[in-house]
Image (tube, rainbow, N blue to C red):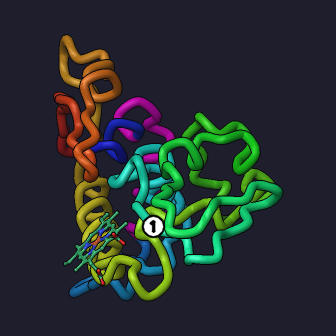
Amino acid sequence: MTYLFYHLAQEPEHVQKIRKEVQSLMKGDWSDKDIHGAMHLNGAINEALRLHPPVPSGLFRMTPPEGLHVGETFIPGSTTYLMPSYVMGRDEHNYEDADSFVPERWYSRPDMIKHKDAYAPFSMGPMGCIGKNLALTELRTLTARLLAGFDVSLAQGEDGKRIMTETLDHFTVDPGDLDLVFTKV
Ligand code: HEM
């Protein structure tokens, strides 16, 4: 949520797009199933998770006793290795214009994703995150509710640098400070 709003505060055109998209879906007693398919909202959440993965260094895994080939590289057996999510998310081999926040790449610009398998902020397979759907439901509903009623901007004196330079990686991410202002629309 913090990193998503870091981008939204600086690129208000995405706030407008998401607001327009969800306002038509949030009718009466709405719930997540009504906004589940909101493409720009989902794209923005994916971009925040791609550029700022909550487990930035990735997960430790052990190769099988016979070892493992990854492309042309052989990793010997019983070796601990990891694939850093932060690096994979910003690699130009995986994404076009990798450092930019482009929600459209997840729906109307699939050409901007070169390797879809590189995106796994919740991990995958039998050890993957059991809370993935709950987490995405919370991200969607809270973001939709906030953007339907508020504009967001950086607070006076906030340049957005601390969140990028003071974030720590303790296996899970510990974001640096970010002061935002929410203004009722
Ligand atoms: C954006 C939010 C979240 C992200 C990015 C995330 C990411 C992850 C990742 C990468 C793992 C795999 C850890 C590993 O294999 O060593 C994991 C495991 C797990 N997550 Fe999440 N998670 C999120 C939210 C949640 C929520 C909301 C819950 C519960 C309500 C949850 C519960 C769990 C549990 C129980 C595991 C262990 C699963 C197992 O070992 O079988 N997570 N999560």
Q: Decide: is 106 above or below 57.
A: below
> How many C-alpha atoms fall within 10 Å of the one at disc 1: few (<14), some, or many (≥20)?
few
Magenta residue span: 8-23
Image position, residue 151 (x, y; %):
28, 41
In the figure, is residue 173 to the left or right of 71? left
Residue 108 shown left or right of residue 79 in the figure: right
Q: Which residue type does callout 1 highlight? A: Arg
Q: Nearer the viewer, residue 143 or 55?
A: 55
The residue that label 1 is drawn on is: 61
Q: Quadrant of residue 123?
A: bottom left
Asked which secondary structure carries label 1, the reply is: strand
Q: Identify which residue is drawn at 28% across, 31% down.
A: 153
- Inspect this view and state whether residue 17 appears: no
- Foreground of the two, 64 or 42: 64
Residue 52 position in % (x across, y down) = 41, 45
Q: Is residue 169 magenta?
A: no
Residue 140 figure quarter: bottom left
Where residue 68 sits, quadrant-wise, is bottom right
Q: Is residue 10 left or right of residue 68?
A: left
Instruction: Tell me if residue 13 is in the magenta stretch.
Output: yes
**Residue 19 position within the rendered picture, expressed as x and y whole percent measured from the top left:** 40, 57
| Direction from residue 175 to residue 18 in the image, left or right | right
- What secondary structure do most residues of the magenta stretch adopt? helix
